[in-house]
Image: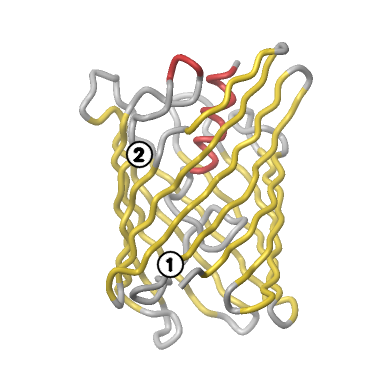
Amino acid sequence: MRSFLLFIFAGLLSFSPALACRPMLTDDCGVIPRGSLLLETGVLSYSQSISSSQTLATTVTYGIAPNTQIAVDLPYCRISSNGNAVAGIGDVNVKAKVQISEAEINPFGFSFTVGSKLNNGDVNQGLGSGQSELFANAVLTRPTRFGAVHLNLGYTLTGVLSNYAAYNPINLSAILEYNLAEQTKIFSEIAGMTSQATAPLQLTLGLNKSFSEYLTLDCGAYFGLTDAVPKSIYTMGVTASLI
């Protein structure tokens, strides 16, 4: 059960290798300015009957060039089942994103992300998948009068540098972003991936509110549309520009 719950959360976090803006899973085409540092962190909470899981999902992003950023995902997980609990760092993602076209000055924005999921989590305690991965993700953003539309298409190589019998999933997701009021946005998202068993598919509804150019708060809910994803997972978080 512990491993099962972790894999659910890992699946949620890896539908797309980056976040457009919390609490969504789909990426957008934007990158942060060179020399800027961005911190995104939030708690995902799931529980049912005798099992529960909480993940503190943190992403640190740094702009290394005018059109390029690097980022690290650091998930801290606590999983409990039948009165037993384990906690620790899960598998870490390291990734780089290059912007090809800016949505603000072109009809479409486009970027490309490549990265790797490390095999650092303790698989015996259910805190890791036991395999390393390589992934790539293409991002298309289309500005609209009401906000924007974001589309992602990704591919993952599983079992890299191991004897794991690899299955390489394709990820597909889309966001409808709506500017509700000044500095307030609402989002609806559909995200899924191919699978050898029941394919994960989920609907996400979210909201964020910017209080300045440096601080944004958010909340959201993920609703599983297939048995591979929990019926509901809730999240709250913050995004802060540090430089």
Q: Amino acid at mark 1?
A: Leu
| Mark 2 or 1: the one toward you | 1
The residue pinned by badge 1 equals 37
> Dot 2 lies on which element?
strand
Q: Which residue is mark 2?
A: 117
Counting other residues with Cα less than 10 Å from the Cα at mark 2, is it few (<14), some (14-19), or many (20 or more)?
A: many
Please indicate whether residue 3 sits to the left or right of residue 128 in the image: right
Q: Which residue is drawn at the image coordinates 57% and 26% (left, top)?
A: 87
Whether tag 2 and tag 1 are in contact, CB under 8 A, the answer is: no
* Residue 80 found in image quarter: top right
Query: Dividing the image into 4 quarters, which one contains the N terminus?
Result: top right
* Residue drawn at 66 percent across, 63 percent down: 187
Horizontal side of 76 relative to 92 (left or right) equals right
Residue at the outermost bottom position: 105
The x, y position of residue 68, in whole percent, is: 30, 69
Picture coordinates of residue 72, whole percent (x, y): 39, 50
- Residue 215 got which mark? none
Q: Is residue 214 left or right of residue 129?
A: right
State how far apart marks 2 and 1 are (Cα).
21 Å
Q: Nearer the viewer, residue 22 or 190?
A: 22
